[in-house]
Image: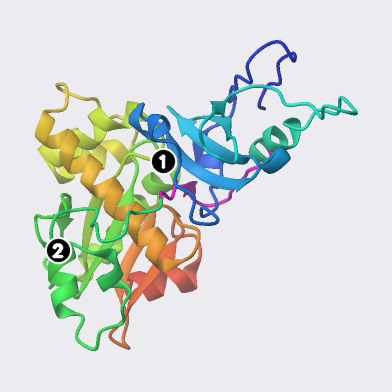
Amino acid sequence: MILRFPAAAALLLASTWSMAQMPVPLLSGSQTPPAFITERGAVVVKIEPGPGGMTAYTALKDGKPFVVFTTADRQVTMVGVLFDSKTGENLSDSYVDRANAMRVSGAASVPVVPRAAGTNATPGISAKEVFAGRAAHQPIAEMLFSSTVAGVVEGNGTPVNTAYVFFDPQCGYCHELYRRTRQVVKSGKSIKWIPVNVLGDKGIPLAAEVLRQGMPAMERLASSSLQASSAPTPLEREQIRNNTRFFNDIAHQAGKQMATPTTVFARPDSKFGVMQDDGSNAKAFAAAFGTGN
């Protein structure tokens, strides 16, 4: 649960349940979060109107949620308990309650951050192109397949015959999807596993290990036996950041809630589809990977 502290204390929020159980809705509106939140490593996952004309931002830092409020002129940002000046009613607990009530089944939640106009998450790549529904999806598939998006490819399929899975190393549902896709690769389908950081910085060393060692690391990750052999290099950190930004861009462009594991795949109508499931949904699994699990 998320703890509420007395009025004199700041609203410090603590989580006793896994981030893999916490859904994160798309950001509402076009508000840009205060820069200092993201600069300090937090990810804003929800924006909504706050009391008295303020704006409320729910953010995650190392897997723990917290709520900040900004005044209408955005000149002041605060963290704390808010009261109605006339009645004394607590106005901030409802935001805490909504964060505490977040749950998801079958996927770990992915924060969705609005992208600045005219920018791409990864150099040379625009998620807008992925969801533009172009008649020829081969260039898009080759773009996801290329080294510009850091990941590990298994199988001998073509770019179009490859499913692209965004995963967080700390996501148990991602491990389950990996186990359920072993027959898929044997059938001739390729999978590109793209590590992202959405469940906290503890996953970064494991993500770097996957980029460094490839499929042997993925196998150990799925069995919960992977350990980091060394600290992530600056290049590996940048690759993981770029993957995460591109993933956020995809979620924003898709216009719907996204979760890890998220699988992007070429559809027969020359567009790209998205599956957000651990493989337990047989119909979705068949659509994404072209075979049963």
* Quadrant (top left/top right/bottom left/bottom right) for the C terminus: bottom left
105 falls in the magenta region: yes
Quadrant housing residue 43: top left
Quadrant housing residue 125: bottom left
Q: Residue at x 33, y 37 (%)?
A: 223
The answer to whether 284 appears left or right of 10 in the picture is left
Q: Residue at x 45, y 41 (%)?
A: 33
Residue 157 visible in this rendered orientation of the protein: no
The answer to whether 228 appears left or right of 106 in the picture is left
Which residue in the protein does label 1 denote?
171
Vertical placement of residue 253 versus 109, above or below:
below
Magenta part of the chain = 101-113
Decide: few, some or many residues near mark 1? Use Cα within 10 Å; few <14, some 14-19, many ≥20.
Answer: many
Point out which mark residue 70 bears. Answer: none
- Residue 141 or residue 66, whichever sits in front: 66
Residue 280 x/y as whole percent: 49, 60
Q: Which of marks 2 and 1 precedes in the sequence?
A: 2
Which residue in the protein does label 2 denote?
145
Residue 84 x/y as whole percent: 82, 30
Quadrant housing residue 227: top left
- Residue 239 or residue 59, whichever sits in front: 59
Vertical placement of residue 52 versus 165, above or below:
above
Residue 3 x/y as whole percent: 68, 21
Question: Which element type, helix, strand or loop, lies under badge 2?
Answer: helix
* Quadrant (top left/top right/bottom left/bottom right) for the N terminus: top right
The disc labelled 2 sits on which kind of residue? Phe
Q: Residue at x 29, y 37 (%)?
A: 221
- Residue 212 or residue 137, whichever sits in front: 137
| CA separation in Å, label 1 and label 2 | 23 Å
